[in-house]
Image (tube, rainbow, N blue to C red):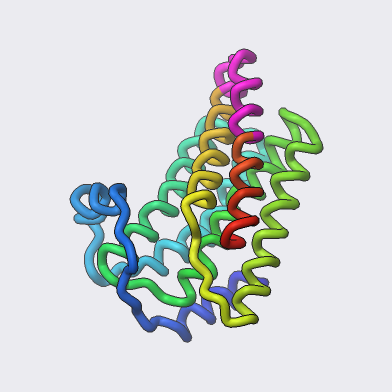
Amino acid sequence: MGYSIIIANYMANTNFEPAEEIYWHDRILAKTVLRFFPKSILPNHITVFRFLTTPIVAVLMFYEHYYIGLFAFLLVAFTDALDGSMARTRNQITEWGKIYDPLADKILIASMVFIIVLRYIDFWTAIIIIGLEIIIIFTAWIRMKKGIKIQANLWGKIKMWLQVIGVVVLLLSIIFNWAALLPFASGVLYLAIAFAIVSLLTYGI
């Protein structure tokens, strides 16, 4: 699906829903970082920002600009926490956000895996991570077509942040030539694979 279609779908769907549950990190972000975001900025704006900036991060990684790429990746990955917490604490959850927020996360992680995990760890780790993300997206799409409620679960959130940690540790090992961190990065990504499977077997996203 092209980015223009994603943005068009966003413009066509801005009906808000209240949050069913607010997590501890939502309250922390609401009292700190989110206080600097005016009411005119919506959670879906941040999700669109993640879609638009992911290719920039991918280009930085592809051309091995790892110093700036690390900071860019952390910034873009952090928007995943921001848009979710903003949506829940401001009662601005939308059907569009439920679908495209996790999709934006998967595109970001898949691009990092394809570019650096494939290059520095091994082929099969990268293929399994990307393959599981594709299966999760397909499963979520089927559930949506059947009218089943789509909502990210705890296992999926843990999986996402394990993937982020694994990529960050891998980048640190590359930037500072710390070979000892490479097995740790691999272990974190293997753990993320396990949580991805649990997430898939529970709620499908």
**Left or right of 44: which side holds 156?**
right
Marker count (numbered): 0
The vertical placement of 17 against 115, above or below, is: below
Q: Which region is colored magenta?
A: 173-190
Q: Nearer the viewer, residue 132 or 36?
A: 132
Please state, as top left, top right, bottom left or bottom right, where the N terminus lies in the image: bottom right
Q: Quadrant of residue 113?
A: top right
Residue drawn at point x = 52 percent, y = 35 percent: 165
Asked if residue 186 is among those painted magenta in the image, a careful observer would answer yes
Residue drawn at point x = 63 percent, y = 73 percent: 143
Residue 107 x %, y %: 62, 56
Please state, as top left, top right, bottom left or bottom right, where the C terminus lies in the image: bottom right
Residue drawn at point x = 57 percent, y = 50 percent: 56
Q: Nearer the viewer, residue 161 or 33?
A: 161
The vertical placement of 158 against 65, above or below, is: below
Residue 134 x %, y %: 71, 58
